[in-house]
């Protein structure tokens, strides 16, 4: 394959990756109820229409609550795990790291089913809590991973220097390590929030009629309707995610978030 | 006939010329070292010869052929990289066979040539080992064998020995020298180590800021540096200002304080009498005495430091006339203490004096 | 010190144990317990649920179909992923940021939005059909959605990022001078790919393949939305649980799917090791 051909193929693939996202944004601002090219006109009408769909408004509210609560719950879990990993010089560190990342690699389908069955078997009615617990499990590894990655590159002599100045363990963590790991913590938190906000696979099993998140609301709306109100909701999400992704890249590097072969 | 000719090569990154109108010609079978501090353009020059980096302007001729337009893969050069760049997933033999495979040399012929190359670098018993099962020196040999297996028009080496410890480096230098000599391959070697350059080379090109400061045999570059930069880079750090008293034929008479002496005239020294010059003397040529010498060059000074480093004692002497300049004098430690007091006289054979035009490089004294 | 460290691990392990390990165990137990789910376990071993499910060959056919689709998706992801990973590898620092954003974009957008985007393009009244109709190139709309092709397209689009990231992680470890050494030796792009890059990025390919395969096996929203009736195993599991409320059957199918995915992953690892260099690698796994 020559260099020119390679560049062409690579560009084509990039266009293909962006194609559905571009189609969403396109449909959301085109006047036509059924997307045609070229559009008859440009309008923001569909955004207003989307706002008028009650289930979307309610879904957005629930998604925000669920994402916030599960992120708040996942933060201490992820942070303590990262601190433990960063401080532990032991042959057990690698297997523990792998175990901590398990929720990332277990398919959402399985997490959803298993938790649903477990809650049913426990006989407890925890309502809203079911979905929040599921998301906490699903997202805490991202916070742990980014924080750990930030801690791991810190100069160990800083910790030692603080120790020689008489700082206790807690002060070392609180005044030295965590402030320096802030980019990783912030990136992990944003990413965890997005993962919870976007989630469908886990929520499908754990949400109930009272906790229909925005993606679920869109999903059920799509069963009976196919109008650009959905495009407007989705486009808003695409645009929001785009800025979040730029921020994540700045803060931490997107590549490291998924950490295929993180070092 | 010159095997490798570079004609006015220029390469710029951003606004700065990394290689600046550089020309040189290297006769067939000779070993040239590009010597200079980091950032002087020596590695870039090597990569331009290999075709890995395109030059902005200028021509590269290999074996009488203009190869400027040829891609790296078509130039038939052999190259040993700084990291060695052995293929980690191939055995030593497969690494060495790779260029032959690319050429389409088949089966038995290939095995025979690989075997011969392995023997040549004394690696006969290690054919099946992988790079991470070889020692540093063994990896060097494999890289060298891979670079010469397809009879390249020119062999290029980019600081290949810089990661080795001193003893191994000496050994590898010896081996490279004899291998290249036996095979008669035209070779360009890049290094920042002046000792290495002197040991290896038929020709040394001392580079600075993308240009060649001096291109000559190692003895000449060492003993007769033409610029303060070259002198300094070759470890000759003793400079002092002097004046030309007389220019006559191929002799120059230099006036230095009270003394005046005649030295051979450098080819690039033109100028009127009373021209300010800089003279340079190698540390090992200077002797110390308690009293001024009867004749010849002489400088008064004060010993400010003595360091014993085994075979040598190194003295630091601040010059009385020019206290801003200190000279380094290296004497055999077996000679015993050179002087009784710290107030000394420095002297040296007149022909050990290098005369340079002083305005050329006032700024190059720092290293 | 170690005492304090293990104390720090407590919250995470509590979460993993209570919310992941225990539920997985209950899932597994439900598939071999005589109780009717949902409800308390009877702790009475039976394979009855497996018998009920596999009495009908439909589920085995569905499993085979899911494995086949996942294999195709994996193969395509590796090809597409390799091209993009190389592009990412050779890109300049600025270009690399854009490329990275493009590659992970499908992962960051919810599956509903992403699938809806494909429906806009491929649907009966989607952009392709309306354009072709208005140009007079076709008389009736093409059927692109609700085909196996659509499922594969949707999944490859979603999962390519995992292949790209894994392969790129491997490529990044290759010293660029190694490529230059091959160039100087006279090798062209194809040979550099086949003789140098491919064998050296095998670990990344293997990691990417296992990730993509297991995620493809368990994907169910993309197949459900883009495949219509032609869905996949995971979609059936969803229906078992949420439509026909047969939790035991659902648990059986989930366990079977997990096992199939595991076997597939092991198969990929074995293939990768067979093609790897014939000796124990010294460097640690990625």
Image (cartoon, coloured by chain):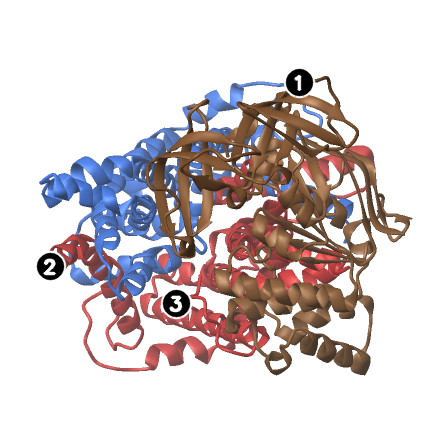
Chain colours: A blue, B brown, C red
Marks 1/3 in contact by CB < 8 Å: the verdict is: no
Q: Callout 3 environment at 10 Å: few (<14), some (14 to 19), or many (20+)?
A: many
Disc 2 element = helix
Residue for badge 3: C254
Asked whether the residues under marks 2 and 3 belong to the same chain, the reply is yes
How far apart are the two marked residues, 2 and 3, measured between alpha carbons?
38 Å
Q: Position of residue C62 (x, y in %)?
A: 53, 69
Asked whether the residues under marks 1 and 2 belong to the same chain, the reply is no
Residue for badge 2: C3
Tell us which disc is closer to us: 1 or 2: 1
Quadrant assignment for the C terminus of chain C: bottom left
Q: Position of residue B272 (x, y in %)?
A: 73, 17
Tell us which disc is closer to us: 2 or 3: 2
Decide if residue C74 is in sight here: yes
How far apart are the two marked residues, 1 and 3, measured between alpha carbons?
95 Å
The tag on residue C75 is none
Asked whether the residues under marks 1 and 3 belong to the same chain, the reply is no
Residue for badge 1: B275
Disc 1 element = loop
The quadrant holding residue B38 is top right
Does C7 sit left or right of B203 as displayed?
A: left
Q: Position of residue A52 (x, y in %)?
A: 42, 24
Q: Nearer the viewer, residue C49 or B154?
A: B154
Q: Chain of mark 1?
A: B
Q: Position of residue A146 (x, y in %)?
A: 34, 45
Residue beneath the point at 73% across and 64% down? B180
Position above or below: A186 against C268: above
Does C120 sit left or right of A170 as displayed?
A: right
């Amino acid at each position: 394959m020559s260099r020119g051909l390679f560049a062409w193929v690579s560009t084509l693939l990039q266009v293909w990756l962006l194609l559905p996202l571009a189609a969403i944004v396109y449909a959301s601002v085109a006047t036509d109820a059924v997307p045609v090219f070229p559009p008859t006109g440009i309008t923001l009408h569909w955004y207003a229409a989307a706002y008028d769909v009650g289930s979307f408004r309610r879904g957005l509210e629930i998604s925000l609550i669920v994402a916030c609560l599960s992120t708040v719950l996942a933060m201490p879990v992820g942070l303590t795990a990262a601190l433990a990993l960063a401080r532990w010089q032991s042959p057990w560190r690698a297997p523990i790291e792998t175990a901590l990342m398990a929720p990332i690699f277990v398919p959402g389908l399985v997490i959803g089913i298993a938790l649903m069955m477990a809650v049913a078997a426990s006989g407890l009615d925890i309502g809203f809590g079911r979905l929040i617990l599921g998301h906490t499990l699903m997202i805490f590894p991202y916070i742990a991973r980014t924080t750990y990655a930030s801690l791991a590159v810190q100069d160990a002599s800083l910790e030692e220097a603080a120790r020689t100045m008489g700082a206790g363990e807690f002060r070392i963590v609180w005044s030295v390590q965590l402030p320096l790991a802030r980019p990783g913590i912030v990136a992990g938190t944003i990413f965890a929030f997005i993962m919870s906000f976007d989630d469908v696979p886990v929520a499908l099993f754990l949400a109930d009629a009272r906790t229909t998140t925005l993606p679920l609301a869109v999903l059920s709306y799509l069963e009976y309707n196919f109008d650009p109100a959905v495009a407007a909701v989705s486009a808003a999400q695409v645009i929001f995610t785009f800025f979040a992704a730029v921020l994540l890249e700045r803060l931490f590097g997107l590549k490291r978030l998924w950490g295929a072969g993180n070092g | 006939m010159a095997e490798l000719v570079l004609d006015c090569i220029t390469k710029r990154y951003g606004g700065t010329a990394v290689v600046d109108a550089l020309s040189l010609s290297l006769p067939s079978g000779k070993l040239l070292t590009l010597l200079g501090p980091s950032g002087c353009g020596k590695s870039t020059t090597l990569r331009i010869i290999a075709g890995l980096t395109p030059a902005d302007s200028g021509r590269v001729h290999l074996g009488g052929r203009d190869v400027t337009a040829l891609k790296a893969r078509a130039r038939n050069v052999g190259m040993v990289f700084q990291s060695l760049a052995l293929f980690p997933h191939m055995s030593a033999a497969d690494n060495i066979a790779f260029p032959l495979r690319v050429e389409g040399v088949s089966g038995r012929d290939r095995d025979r040539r690989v075997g011969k190359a392995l023997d040549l670098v004394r690696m006969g018993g290690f054919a099946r080992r992988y790079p991470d099962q070889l020692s540093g020196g063994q990896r060097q040999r494999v890289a060298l064998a891979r670079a010469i297996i397809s009879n390249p028009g020119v062999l290029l080496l980019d600081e290949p020995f810089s990661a080795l410890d001193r003893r191994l480096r000496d050994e590898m230098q010896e081996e490279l020298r004899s291998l290249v000599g036996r095979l008669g391959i035209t070779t360009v070697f890049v290094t920042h180590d002046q000792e290495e350059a002197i040991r290896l080379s038929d020709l040394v090109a001392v580079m600075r800021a993308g240009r060649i400061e001096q291109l000559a045999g190692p003895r000449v570059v060492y003993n007769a540096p033409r610029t303060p930069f070259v002198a300094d880079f070759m470890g000759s750090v003793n400079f002092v200002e002097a004046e030309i008293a007389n220019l006559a034929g191929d002799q120059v008479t230099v006036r230095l304080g009270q003394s005046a002496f005649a030295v051979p005239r450098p080819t690039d020294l033109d100028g009127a009498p009373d021209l300010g010059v800089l003279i340079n003397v190698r540390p090992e040529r200077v002797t110390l005495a308690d009293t001024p010498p009867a004749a010849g060059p002489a400088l008064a000074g004060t010993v400010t430091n003595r360091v014993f480093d085994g075979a040598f004692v190194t003295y630091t002497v601040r010059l009385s006339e020019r206290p801003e300049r200190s000279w380094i004098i290296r004497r055999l430690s077996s000679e015993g203490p050179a002087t009784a007091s710290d107030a000394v006289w420095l002297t040296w054979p007149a022909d050990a004096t290098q005369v340079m035009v002083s305005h050329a490089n006032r700024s190059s004294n720092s290293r | 010190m170690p005492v304090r460290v293990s104390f720090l691990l407590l919250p995470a392990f509590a979460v993993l144990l209570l919310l992941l390990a225990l539920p997985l165990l209950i899932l597994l137990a439900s598939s071999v317990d005589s109780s009717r789910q949902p409800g308390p376990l009877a702790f009475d071993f039976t394979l009855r649920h497996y018998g009920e499910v596999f009495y009908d060959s439909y589920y085995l056919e569905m499993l085979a179909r899911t494995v086949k689709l996942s294999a195709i998706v994996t193969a395509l992801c590796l090809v597409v992923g390799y091209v993009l990973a190389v592009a990412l590898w050779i890109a300049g620092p600025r270009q690399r940021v854009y490329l990275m954003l493009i590659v992970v974009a499908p992962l960051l957008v919810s599956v509903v939005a992403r699938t809806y985007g494909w429906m806009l393009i491929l649907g009966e009244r989607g952009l392709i059909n309306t354009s072709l109709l208005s140009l007079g190139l076709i008389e009736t709309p093409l059927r692109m959605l609700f085909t196996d092709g659509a499922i594969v397209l949707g999944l490859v689009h979603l999962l390519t990022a995992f292949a790209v990231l894994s392969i790129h992680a491997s490529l990044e470890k290759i010293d660029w001078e190694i490529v230059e050494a091959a160039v100087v030796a006279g090798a062209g792009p194809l040979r550099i790919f086949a003789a140098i890059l491919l064998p050296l990025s095998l670990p990344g390919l293997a990691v990417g393949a296992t990730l993509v395969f297991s995620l493809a096996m368990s994907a169910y929203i993309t197949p459900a939305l883009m495949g219509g009736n032609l869905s996949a195993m995971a979609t059936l599991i969803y229906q078992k649980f949420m439509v026909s409320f047969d939790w035991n059957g659902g648990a059986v199918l989930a366990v079977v799917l997990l096992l199939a995915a595991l076997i597939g992953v092991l198969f990929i690892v074995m293939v990768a090791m067979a093609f790897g260099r014939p000796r124990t690698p010294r460097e640690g796994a990625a």
